[in-house]
Image (spheres, grey):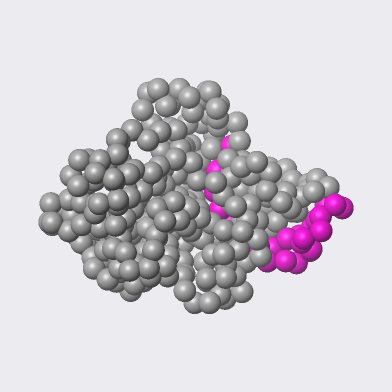
Amino acid sequence: MKAIICTKWGSADVLELREVEKPVPKDNEVLIRICATTVTAGDCELRGLKFSPALRLLMRIGFGFRGPRRKTLGQELAGEIEAVGKDVKLYRQGDQVFAHPGFGMGACAEYICLPEEPKGMEGLLAIKPANMTYEEAAAVPTGGLEALHHLRKGNIQSGQKVLINGAGGSIGTFGVQLAKHFGAEVTAVDSLQKLDMLRSIGADRVIDYTQEDFTKNGGTYDIIFDVIGRSPSSQGTESLKHNGCYLLANPRLSLMFRGQRTPKRSGRKVICGNVIYKTEDLVFLKELIEAGKIKSVIDRRYPLEQTAEAHRYVETGHKKGNVVVTVAQ
């Protein structure tokens, strides 16, 4: 089978299309023919080891010194089950699924084996939304699960005012739609070229961060959902109402290794940390999609052989929503 191999840590130039051995499912696994995957900011950050020196060392220890031990990147996918292990009960050949392979990655290839049920941080799997294409469904797991996790951690309530900083990416676009679903009034912050798209998915107000600083315009919010992934400034937390919540998410993975560092002030709190992916949450997103409540935002599509170019585009920081890699028709 064909797969994109990350030969070593570095720029997008380290990615190569190669023929590798097709995996064989274990008794508790399904073999998925991948139809689409994505390139996320997290993929690019990991490939380039774009971390602080200390964190870079930890990443080398965990993932490999000279290059990744698991050489096929890719954190989300959609495809069709081609074969099932003898102990699999929930799925059958021909089922259309979407999935998050977790730290095992491996989605940037023609095939992958995943366990029928989650195994630690790997193998989250569910039936694909019936009203989505494979490309649309592949863009759901990472951004959708991240946004859902953080908004729930913030105990989002109907009628609250929510600001999403960095709303135009994969997590942010799902965050806007989920916050609206939960009944919030949403202010979306991003660059000028993304503002019309953010209005189209439900944002009540949009802010071009190059023209206006939300921390200085006097607005206050019950929840600030910061997808940019930087530690909040004092001005940022001061934009919270009493008992407000500052949520830190990070599509580049680094906050998974960063603890909460900002002290509570005036009842305000800062929440960050690992996202625990759950099958029931993926099913919840599927139900919202089939009910027409949320959708994927896709900026560009690339064929598998142009995955390196997709990485280069994502690294520009200009993508709107998601960048999809089409693996098979």
Left or right, 172 with reference to 152: left
* Quadrant placement of the C terminus: bottom right
Q: How many marks?
A: 0
Rendering coords of residue 186 (x, y %): 30, 65
Q: Residue visible at 57% across and 64% down?
A: 284
Q: Main secondary structure of the magenta part?
A: loop
Left or right, 224 with reference to 71: left
Q: Nearer the viewer, residue 97 or 154?
A: 154
Visible in this render: residue 30?
Answer: yes
Q: Nearer the viewer, residue 164 or 72?
A: 164
Looking at the image, is 260 positioned above or below residue 154? above
Is residue 95 one of those drawn in magenta? yes
| Quarter of the figure with residue 211 | bottom left
Q: Nearer the viewer, residue 56 or 67?
A: 56
Q: Residue visible at 53% across and 56% down?
A: 141
Is residue 81 one of those drawn in magenta? yes
Q: Residue visible at 51% across and 31% down?
A: 8
Visible in this render: residue 194?
Answer: no
Looking at the image, is 269 positioned above or below residue 183? above
Looking at the image, is 49 positioned above or below residue 129? above
| Quarter of the figure with residue 261 | top left
Rendering coords of residue 189 (x, y %): 25, 58
Rendering coords of residue 231 (x, y %): 30, 39
Rendering coords of residue 298 (x, y %): 43, 65
Q: Residue visible at 61% across and 35% down?
A: 70
Numbered range of the magenta stretch: 71-98
